[in-house]
Image: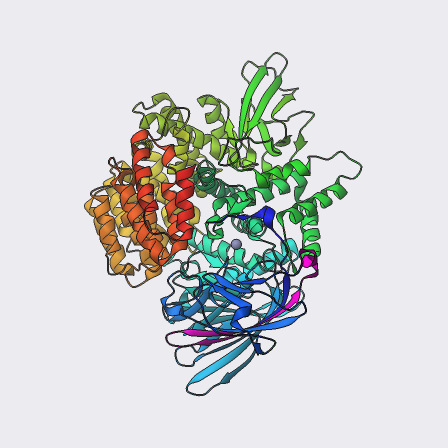
Amino acid sequence: MTAVRLADYRPAPYLLGRTDLTVRLWADHAEVEAELAFSPNPAAAEQGPAPLKLAGIDLTLEALAIDGRPLDPAHYTLERDGLILHQPPQSPFVLHSRVRLHPHSNTTLEGLYVSGGLFTTQCEAEGFRRITFHPDRPDLLSRFRVRIEAEQASCPVLLCNGNCLETGVLERGRHYAIWDDPFPKPSYLFALVAGVLEEAREPFETASGRPVQLRLHVEPGDLPFTTHAMTSLKRAMRWDEERYGLEYDLDEYNIVAVRHFNMGAMENKSLNIFNSKLVLADSETATDGELERIESVIAHEYFHNWTGNRITCRDWFQLSLKEGLTVFRDQSFTADLHGASLNRIENVGLLRNTQFREDAGPTAHPVQPDAYEVIDNFYTTTIYEKGSEVIRMLHTLLGEKTFMNGMALYVSRHDGSAATCDDFVQAMDDAAREAWSGRPAAFDFGQFRRWYHQAGTPVLQIQRHWNGERGELTLHIQQHTPATPCQPHKQPLVIPLAMGLVGQGGEALPLHAAQARQLPPQWGHHSQLVVIDQAETELRFTGLPQQHHPPALSLLRQFSAPVKLELGRPVAELVHLLAHDSDPVARWDAGQLLLRRGILARSQGEPDQQLEEELADAFARILADPSLSQASRAMLLSLPGQAELEDAASNGDLSPDPPALFAAAQALRRHLGEVLEEPLLQLLEACEPQWTAIWPQGQGDRRLTGLIWSWRAAAADAGVIDQARQAVDGPSMTLARLGLSALQCHDLPQRQAASDAFFARWQHKPVILDTWFALEAAAPFGDGLARVQRLLEHPRYDPNAPNSVRAVLGGLAGNAPVFHAPGGAGYRFMAEQIAALDQRNPITASRLAKVLSRWRSYGSERSDQMRAALEHLDSCKLSTNTREMVELSLSQ
Ligand SMILES: [Zn+2]
């Protein structure tokens, strides 16, 4: 395999003015005629005359002509992955081609394929080359006009990007539609859908008065489940106008729900295609979390209309330009709608359990990678979530006003073009210069750019010296970023560190230091921002109360940077912060640290009784604190995720024991469920009246109910176990799923009854049944692998639906006692499944292969077994996608 390198980027030799397609859909194949209007690119003139390479995969070429004259076979070469024109004209010309392809047997779900009788497309990143011969590179923006022809009975609805210009009837029961997209776009944003669909339609008027038709297309019978998605879309459109001043720009906006889809959703210009699980929902069929996620994904794809479509990426190394920025925008949207702190805490949890793990393994890569073999493997949490954290740090460092000025500058400079991450940072840099004019720069933008190029999670090691007689606190801060593959040495980054001090009575103490800047009140009382940009920094705070003990140190408020902290804060200090920190994120994090310590101690067979007592007391006070919402209580008491625990357990020579950590977390749940019985049961009663309130009302009460159920079920509370079992039959999907989760780890007749009842109720709804598959695959008892095998052979299991595959195999990977069981059978089983899946769907297979990549992180026995499973996979016939992932994992 050959790597693609950022350093090798060259402008395309030919610009592409127009892409005109005629797509004829038939019962067993499709035919695509393309007219591509090329002209020599002045920006590439110095490269001299060059052959023109067009990408094309699994296409049968039937005709090829230039300016109407058929091309002599001596003038081109057809290769496995494309077509080379040896001597293209040095003046503008039109290339005409006709190809035949087979969407019905395309199980890769890239390019044009059929899902449940529906023709649909997925072109990002490189799927368009499976539709026609084309340069298929993101920096070539062309105007698309598309004519679709199909049988009227099986494909009454014909959709494409842009505006529909014309429809009409053809002979032999066929019909056509012509679509024109006035906005030039790269080929990865092309989309086409044809089939039997029902439509929900609502009008929208933009701030400047443009009427827009919002149309949501779903399979027949699914219309009742579209209200939430439609409402979410309108909210997102209004929010982007109000916060960013960005309006929609076409007459219609289409969303189509598709069952077989490799990702969550795709932002194709004016024709978004969604995984149906991210469209279809109401409170009976979706949980609170799913409703919020649907709202945020609808918003995310809509926001791409500006950050992604109007301004696109020059090349795939710039993927985070659109993804990091758009994730930041959708997170801000959810924070504005549902509360900033809870949203932040959820996102920090996600980052720690996924991106930090990626950063510490063989697939670690920077937000802007400098080489790849298969771009599909780079749709990672680093590109998305860490990319968003980098944007958030800019927002923190610059403040809202300057950040928004930078955004406006970015949009005005690059609208209608393909840009780079550097272009974005440059716009922010220029906005900052203007804001700082006459004052020293708050930080160095050149150094900040390292966040884009350095992989790995930075660590801040902090030592503190307290002079109680003078009321003076000194912090000695060292930053370092661990080595990652191909990057042994790292340079210091610009790290915004938000902090505060909490006095003995729980009050926020004003801070005075030369280097610090006061933050707005939403960061907690008396919060200060310090910019850490050296390998070693010393901070001195004076004028603090003269007392024996130092004030409690609240660090990384709002999780101001995606870093890890190393600082030995005693249990009493963390308990104090858990009780009093005015920043909800730092407060939650203090509890997380205590929980992690408690679980680690238990996993090593030595429960820390004093810590657990103090923790239980602190939790009792939180449960009784009338100033807290139920949602905050649930958040503060939630246990850290398994990935985070494994990470915390791999300090020094220690390697994590996943089943032991899993069991320890469960044991701590049981213990806390026992000692806090009274306040938990009181709160459960208080939550009950809100159980059936319609989302977003009552979501905090339901969340806390789930936590109480799982703690009390762990403590074998017969009443709670009964309640959780019965929730499956009730009107709320949130409660049904919380009930199933609470019973999940216990091999009880009630668990089996709940699982059977859920299956019976939802067996005809694949979107919901995937949940059941995931829960069954993750059940941590009995013969887990045999159960997973039965699921894979289950008549309702659809091996061509990535959602189902991820439910079962992802469920197994998250099932620590079964996947990591001694002997390594779980690893071998997984490797065999991935090899088989890879034959059908390389994108889903290679993403799943990551679960075997961290073999070096475990103790020698597990490590050997996991490596053996990878080597077995390596010996199989693999796609380039999965091959890259396996080789990366083995080589580092
Ligand atoms: Zn996106």
* Residue 568 colored in magenta in the image: no
Q: Quadrant of residue 209?
A: bottom right
In the rendered image, the residue lying farthest to the front is 74
Position of residue 579 measured from the top left corner of the image (x, y, whole percent): 48, 29
In the rendered image, the residue lying farthest to the top is 469
Q: How many numbered marks have been drawn onto this rendered protein structure?
A: 0
Residue sitting at 58 percent across and 40 percent down?
453
Q: Quadrant of residue 91?
A: bottom right
- Display coloring: rainbow
In the rendered image, the residue lying farthest to the bottom is 171
In the rendered image, the residue lying farthest to the right is 438
* Along the line of sight, the residue nearer the viewer: 497 or 426: 426
Position of 468 relative to 689 (above/below): above
Specify start and end residues of the magenta stretch as a single range. Answer: 22-48
* Residue 46 colored in magenta in the image: yes
Position of residue 669 measured from the top left corner of the image (x, y, whole percent): 32, 34
Position of residue 472 measured from the top left corner of the image (x, y, whole percent): 63, 17
* Quadrant of image for the C terminus: top left
Task: Tell me: 80 left or right of 451.
Answer: left
Position of residue 443 measured from the top left corner of the image (x, y, whole percent): 68, 35
Position of 723 relative to 760 (above/below): above
